Image: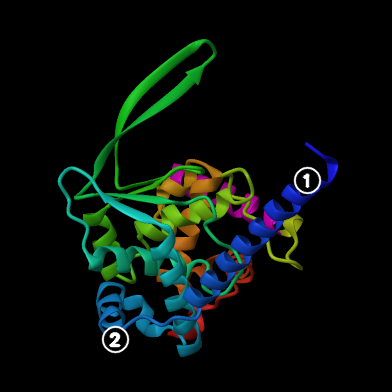
Amino acid sequence: MSHLLIVGLICIGLGFWLYRRRKAKEARQALLQSPLSEVERQVTLEQVPLLHNMPSDLRAKLEGKMNLFLDQVEFIGCNGLEITEEMELSIAAQACLLVVNTDAWYVHLRTVLVYPGAFKSKTTEHDGYVVREAEVIRSGESWQYGPVILSWAHTQQGAINTEDGHNVVLHEFAHQLDSLSGHTDGAPLLPNGQSFAEWDRVFAKSYKRHIKKVEAGHKTLLDAYGATLPEEFFAVAVEAFFEKPAALQKEEPEVYAQIKDLLQLDPVVWR
């Protein structure tokens, strides 16, 4: 094969790749600029009443990102659950709420598994050369390069009750957001201008304080589960950020400010 022929084939391949990339970018932009239908909008507001508080400009952005999410992600019902449009819209709206005002995106996510209720999950613990496996009951689970798994019963209840500080979709997608840094450790990728050193200082201090409160048996604003690991503390803080913003801002003003800068949102003023 001649040198010129090889060069020609490479140029053709490169041109085709650039063409497909441009088309994919155009399709993405079209989805981001597309609103929901009036029926989809009403269903979404019924399923996720928290969205009634959002400013109109953010709600328009949310609808575009929901369309992109719904185009990218496949929903699979488990244990006989039939996936409905209400389920897809509810989960998409809550997931996209975390990324509505930033450039962050769930680039690795392709599948959401939905169970009717709580489901069994296997955990593995390593103690030296000893490996222990156990089954635990969960309402949600997030895998960095795999699916998000949700209980529909807990998903629906978490969305309907907007002020209890418990929302399984916000929790699991906080883990997805966290994992975009390459590690799920409570230290997500930060936007330009936000200091990682300051994030680490604020969250480390607040996390230690939360552990002490939980161990002492005190009532806490943030779910006690947040005392298990830094990534869980971040996830429960995100739940409170949306569902108990004023209380979080009052009790943990620095944590609230850091999440506000991360997500470019301020739910306190929505209310």
Segment colored magenta:
199-215
Q: For the point 38% across and 64% down, which residue is it?
A: 70
- View extreme (right): residue: 3
- Give the Cα distance between marks 1 and 2: 54 Å
Q: Is residue 206 left or right of residue 151?
A: right
Q: Nearer the viewer, residue 41 or 141?
A: 41
Whether residue 221 appears in this view of the structure is no
* Most frequent secondary structure within the magenta stretch: helix
Kind of residue at disc 2: Glu
Whether residue 206 appears in this view of the structure is yes
- View extreme (front): residue: 2
Q: Which residue is mark 2?
A: 38
Q: Position of residue 265 (x, y in %)?
A: 55, 76
Q: Quadrant of residue 154?
A: bottom left
Q: Nearer the viewer, residue 83 or 150?
A: 83
Q: Which residue is mark 1?
A: 5
Q: For the point 53% across and 47% down, which residue is it?
A: 231
